[in-house]
Image: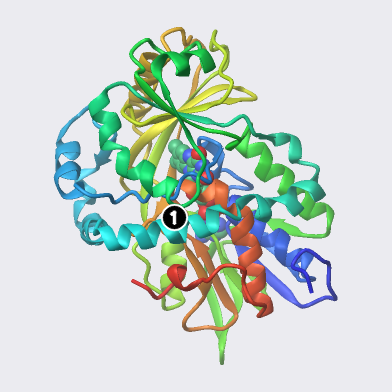
Amino acid sequence: MSATATAAPKGEAVVIGAGIVGVCCALYLQRDGHSVTLVDPRGVGLGASFGNAGNLGWASCVPAAMPGVLKKVPQMLFDGNAPLKLHWGHVPAAAGWFARFIAAARPSRIEAIADARQALLARLHEGYAPLLEAAGAEDLIDYSGLLMTWESDEAFAGSRYALELRRRRGVPMDELDGNEARQMEPALAPSVMRAVHFPRLAHVIDPLRLTETLARHFEQRGGRIRREAARGFEMGPSGPVAVTTDAGRIAADRFIVAAGVWSKNLARQLGTRTPIEAERGYHNVFPQPGIALRAAIMSADRYIAVTPMEAGIRATGVAEFADPDRPADMRYAEMVERRAQGLLPGLKTEGRSQWMGPRPSHPDSLPVIGRSPRFGNVVFAYGHDHIGLALGGITGRLVADIVAGRPTPVDLTPYRPDRF
Ligand SMILES: Cc1cc2nc3c(=O)[nH]c(=O)nc-3n(C[C@H](O)[C@H](O)[C@H](O)COP(=O)(O)OP(=O)(O)OC[C@H]3O[C@@H](n4cnc5c(N)ncnc54)[C@H](O)[C@@H]3O)c2cc1C
């Protein structure tokens, strides 16, 4: 039976977390005939899924840990202008994560991680297509491509290996000089010397509206959304029988943990430890930018992404390692703003809004997607770092396949929950 068909009732499922990943899991389970409840104290789409750069980046197979990381990370941590931030009180909690991160930067691991990321990214549109069509949300996707820019030959040379990782995995791209890049995007600064164009790479013009539209469709088909926080699980003889929340309990047969960075404590209660850290990112939305962009832009040497969206131009960046619930430090959003102004000198910033949200990141740049090693009725789906918007649909599809016991279109070994 196809994962997209609606089947006979199959019992109750609870999905914990109503970000893009949880909502897609809920929709795919519902399509399989489960009666599904989504639980989230904040409502729908207000975690990392709210404020990302919107890129559906099938060119994003490159892991965060790359050669030379051992030298670069300490340098960046002590440089106030660098995009990598570590809250010093958080050092003891994050030390193990960084040790694993450095271990992931071995060349053989990088190739394997890039393969595993690409295996999911290659199916991102396949994952979303049935959901977008059914919910009438196809107009939220813009296929106008992505331009990656560099402002020095040295920085471009430093990105060669990352570009080759993509090229060897079949990602089409065209190299441009600065003038060719400015012909495509006249708003780019004269300092842009090199660019790579990824044609037809898509972005979402309003990530919150995407998650909300899918969630509304889920409700229209009988799904339930409860604004409650999962606190733990009521255990039966062979696994959980209910989620306990701050407002009561929700009995079910199947449990999906898809709470982004907040999955850590829930997974631990189910006997699985996962080294997930909040890589907090910041954004500014410029509602009247005074310039127009055709495509999304990623500045490799400014470490920012700039995306034309429905509400204006959104500039995102920074990786701040800190407790996800610690108050935002909006100086970092201002740093992103200054970098965006350097890249796009005509950018007008009046009336801009700012935001911070936690990328749920594992040190090996791979999500967890798989059945709990301890309990057969629990599936984990979290830790999608910089590519969780892109991977929401395919993750939901894979989770439904796992629950149904169907063969999956992707080998799930690299995403095993017990790999750490
Ligand atoms: C600045 C920035 C730029 C990014 N750019 C991109 C991009 O261009 N492309 C891309 O693909 N990805 C991007 N990402 C990453 C992407 O946003 C995330 O990977 C993705 O949103 C993760 O989705 P999620 O559903 O797993 O987590 P979240 O969206 O964080 O959702 C988790 C949900 O769980 C809920 N929750 C927490 N605790 C509980 C509990 N106890 N009980 C119930 N619910 C709970 C939270 O309220 C939240 O709603 C970016 C991220 C950032 C921060």
In the rendered image, which quarter contains the C terminus?
Answer: bottom left
Which residue is pictured at 19% across the width and 37% down the height? 76
**Nearer to us in this view, 281 or 55:** 55
Rendered view: 314 above or below 39: above
Within 10 angstroms of label 1, few (less than 14), some, or many (20 or more) residues?
many
Name the spot of residue 409 as percent of width and height, x first.
Answer: 62, 68
**Nearer to us in this view, 325 or 134:** 134
Q: How many labels, in total?
A: 1
Disc 1, ligand 1: is the CB inside 8 Å?
yes
Rendered view: 264 above or below 335: below
Q: Secondary structure at mark 1?
A: helix
Which residue is pictured at 20% across the width and 29% down the height? 80
The answer to whether one can see residue 48 in this image is: no
In the rendered image, which quarter contains the N terminus?
Answer: bottom right
Which residue is pictured at 20% across the width and 60% down the height? 99
Name the spot of residue 171 as percent of width and height, x first.
Answer: 50, 45
Rendered view: 79 above or below 130: above
Image quadrant of residue 332? top left
The answer to whether one can see residue 342 in this image is: yes
Q: Which residue is mark 1?
A: 261
Which residue is pictured at 57% across the width and 53% down the height? 122
Q: Amino acid at mark 1?
A: Val
